[in-house]
Image: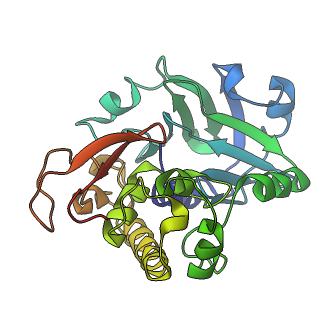
């Protein structure tokens, strides 16, 4: 699943391409991917344009004149922008040799659920292999309710602090990795960056949250902010050079120290990285460096 740095990159790239471009038509190839009625969805998009594209946690927020289009990529969602000159793609599993391989074939293909068509021939494809992702138009009031009820503070904001984490962990018997994956408590973190943050902080993912000492919590706070900042700078881990609108590789993957490195040598101590199942997710850590 794309996490905060990946979704931030998608939002900024699409904002540069789509802001103020008029939507001229829609193709709803999989109506179930849209959480509104087809008629309502079309009436509130066709003829309008996006006034800005942002995100909260892993949720993409497209500002319209009177309301918002929300897009969540979930586990296997992808957004692919195409015009006559460029392709910008973001989301799940963009690491193969060609765009077609990454998105399931030439577009549109069997994984394409929605196509938004813009003036001047530009297109935005929503692809989703497992159909967990969605698009939904909401009002300002509905958006604020969604954000309040479903998203906790996120890294690099004033509400995310060592003090907040200390209060959050206090008396909680939840394993630290499971807690950090809970979007209602900490927004934007997922499997990749939780594994990396816990490694950088020297904390085992199976530790009970309330067992962390103040010094460990402070270090976890600092390394999480630093990690997310660097990942955004390097445009996340799911982007390849041919889809990057700035002609750069989204290559934070080469800076990963534990995630996806099962049995490889730890960069600190040289012992093999361990992979276990924790909180329903594949979890990578060093048995020697993390306590």
Q: Residue at x 78, y 37 (%)?
A: 46
Number of numbered discs visible in the structure rendering: 0
Q: Position of residue 229 (x, y in %)?
A: 43, 73
19 relative to 167, above or below: above
- Looking at the image, residue 254 sits to the left or right of residue 136; the answer is left
Q: Residue at x 36, y 71 (%)?
A: 201
- The reply to whether residue 245 is in sight is no
Q: Position of residue 91 (x, y in %)?
A: 46, 43
Name, please, the residue furthest toward the right.
141
Residue nearest the viewer, comparing 94 with 88: 94
129 relative to 173, above or below: above
Q: Specify how the rendered protein is coloured.
A: rainbow
Q: Residue at x 40, y 75 (%)?
A: 223
The quarter of the rendered structure image containing the C terminus is bottom left
Q: Position of residue 219 (x, y in %)?
A: 42, 79
- Looking at the image, residue 155 sits to the left or right of residue 89; the answer is right
Residue nearest the viewer, comparing 101 with 19: 101
- The reply to whether residue 208 is in sight is yes
Image quadrant assignment for residue 227: bottom left
Q: Position of residue 123 (x, y in %)?
A: 56, 38
Residue nearest the viewer, comparing 229 with 9: 229
- Looking at the image, residue 97 sits to the left or right of residue 77; the answer is left
- Looking at the image, residue 14 sits to the left or right of residue 204; the answer is right
């Amino acid at each position: 699943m794309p996490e905060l740095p990946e979704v931030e990159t998608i939002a900024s790239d699409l904002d540069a391409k789509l802001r103020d471009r008029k939507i001229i038509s829609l193709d709803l190839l999989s109506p179930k991917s849209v959480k509104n009625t087809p008629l309502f969805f079309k009436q509130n998009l066709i003829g309008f344009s996006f006034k800005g594209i942002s995100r909260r946690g892993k949720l993409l927020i497209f500002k319209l004149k009177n309301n918002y289009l929300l897009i969540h990529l979930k586990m296997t969602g992808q957004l692919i922008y195409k015009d006559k000159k460029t392709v910008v793609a973001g989301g799940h599993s963009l690491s193969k040799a060609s765009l077609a391989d990454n998105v399931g074939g030439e577009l549109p293909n069997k994984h394409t659920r929605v196509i938004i068509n813009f003036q001047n021939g530009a297109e935005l494809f929503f692809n989703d292999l497992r159909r967990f992702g969605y698009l939904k138009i909401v009002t300002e009031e509905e958006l604020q309710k969604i954000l309040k009820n479903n998203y906790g503070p996120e890294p690099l904001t004033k509400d995310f602090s060592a003090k907040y984490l200390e209060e959050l962990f206090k008396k909680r018997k939840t394993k630290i990795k499971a807690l950090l994956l809970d979007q209602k408590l900490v927004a934007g973190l997922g499997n990749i960056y939780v594994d990396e943050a816990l490694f950088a902080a020297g904390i085992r993912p199976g530790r009970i949250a309330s067992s962390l000492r103040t010094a460990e919590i402070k270090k976890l706070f600092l390394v999480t902010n630093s990690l997310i900042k660097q990942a955004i700078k390097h445009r996340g881990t799911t982007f390849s050079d041919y889809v990057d609108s700035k002609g750069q590789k989204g290559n934070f993957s080469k800076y990963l120290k534990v995630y996806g490195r099962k049995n490889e040598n730890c960069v600190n101590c040289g012992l093999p990285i361990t992979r276990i199942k924790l909180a329903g997710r594949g979890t990578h850590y060093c048995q020697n460096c993390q306590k």
